[in-house]
Image (tube, coloured by chain):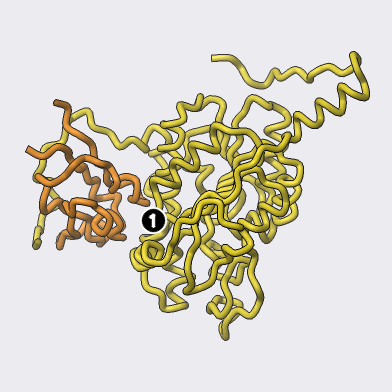
Chain colours: A yellow, B orange
Amino acid sequence: MNETTLEIPCEIPEDARNPVEPFLRMDRMPHIWCAGCGIGTTVNCFTRALLDSKANLDKVAVVSGIGCTGRVAGYARLDSFHTTHGRAIPFATGLKLANPELQVVVYSGDGDLFAIGGNHFIHAARRNMDLKVICVNNMIYAMTGGQTAPTTPGTAITATAPYGVSEPTFNLASLAEAAGASYVARWTTYHVKQLARSMEEVLKRKGFCFIEVLSPCPTLYQRRNKMGDGLDAMKDYKAKSKVRNGAPTGECALSMTGEIVVGKFVDRERPDYLELLRAQMTETLGDRYAEPEVSCCSEG
Amino acid sequence: MAKGFVAIMAERCKGCGFCVEFCPTRVLTLSSAFNSKGYHPPYPVAAEKCSGCDLCGMYCPDFAIFGGRHAR
């Protein structure tokens, strides 16, 4: 138990490589995320999903907004876009419409997607834009110093609510369903296998897909609320989460200490934005409608 | 011989302990040694039990550990 050396006693094959490394810009490591933060874990799941779905990596783009999770775009060795605060979805929409062949993944945090970018989210979901939105929910604005976010649960202590948060919160899964998302799931960073499978599933399907991932924030959320470190949050997720696939999203609100309902809540087929646009244009213009040519994606 | 192996890049570790807690065969423990940033990286105390499932690699937020199976 008391090893004072960092030498590894077991033999490791020489050609063994971390399966994550081909997907990351390793020259930028170590990353800025705190010890015990779960964002790196979600990136692991995302890379496993990319591997398993055999996606063509030249046609996958990651778009992030601002925030801790917004850094993912900078660390992913894919075409990526680090956009202005809250505007990840508008940039992603433009990317998708200009080049519909691209698989556009929006990877951002709860503050970016639901506070500053809240309207963009609901309208992209309403249009059923073919985007895959992964929201890492750490329940707080972490990068700016722990201010109250729309997802901060009641009575939590934050930098802007030293006597406890009194506002009701967003239930992100319910919001996404009501706005029209065609796929809604929630996992925590404890559920790595399920999360990777869920991400793989959305990479293979069309339409607006939303995955919420609960992640620990030991530095700003848990420290102020005396909730321990990252590992305590993970143990908490393990103890309190309950998988209920297909559960009505309205009953899946999160609270500070209550049960965490996880699972795939919504999976429905709706015509996406481009399909509807094409159908409408063809109906109105007939032969005069021509598909716009995509020339920005070189072959090979 | 163990079915799998676990590779640890101690310098990249931030000592969160996710791999130690969630290893299904309890291969790892936090070492008492420090890396250059002052964190305690994991150490395989029971390397022979490793099944090579790579769950530690899935959990590690710092991409500092991974597991794999030995070729037979």
Residue, x 24% and y 52% (percent of image)?
A: B23
Answer with left or right where residue A278 lies relative to residue A75: right
Within 10 Å of disc 1 (Cα), the crowding (few <14, some 14-19, many 20+) is: many
Q: Which residue lies furthest to the bottom in this view?
A: A163
Q: How many marks?
A: 1
User: Is residue A70 among the parts visible in the rendering?
Assistant: no
Residue, x 39% and y 45% (percent of image)?
A: A193
The answer to which quarter of the image holds residue A35 is bottom left
Q: Is residue A110 above or below residue B63?
A: below
Percent coordinates x, y for residue A86 in the rendering: 67, 53
Answer with left or right where residue A200 lies relative to residue B56: right
Answer with left or right where residue A183 lies relative to residue B39: right
Q: What residue type is labelled 1?
A: Tyr
Q: Which residue lies furthest to the right in this view?
A: A284
Q: Mark 1 points at which residue?
A: A190
Residue, x 26% and y 61% (percent of image)?
A: B39
Q: Residue furthest left?
A: B1
In this rendered view, identify the residue nearer to me: A86 or B53: B53
Percent coordinates x, y for residue A99 in the rendering: 68, 26
In this rendered view, identify the residue nearer to me: A296 or A48: A48
Residue, x 51% and y 62% (percent of image)?
A: A138
- The chain that hosts pointer 1 is A
Q: Is residue A138 above or below residue B1?
A: below
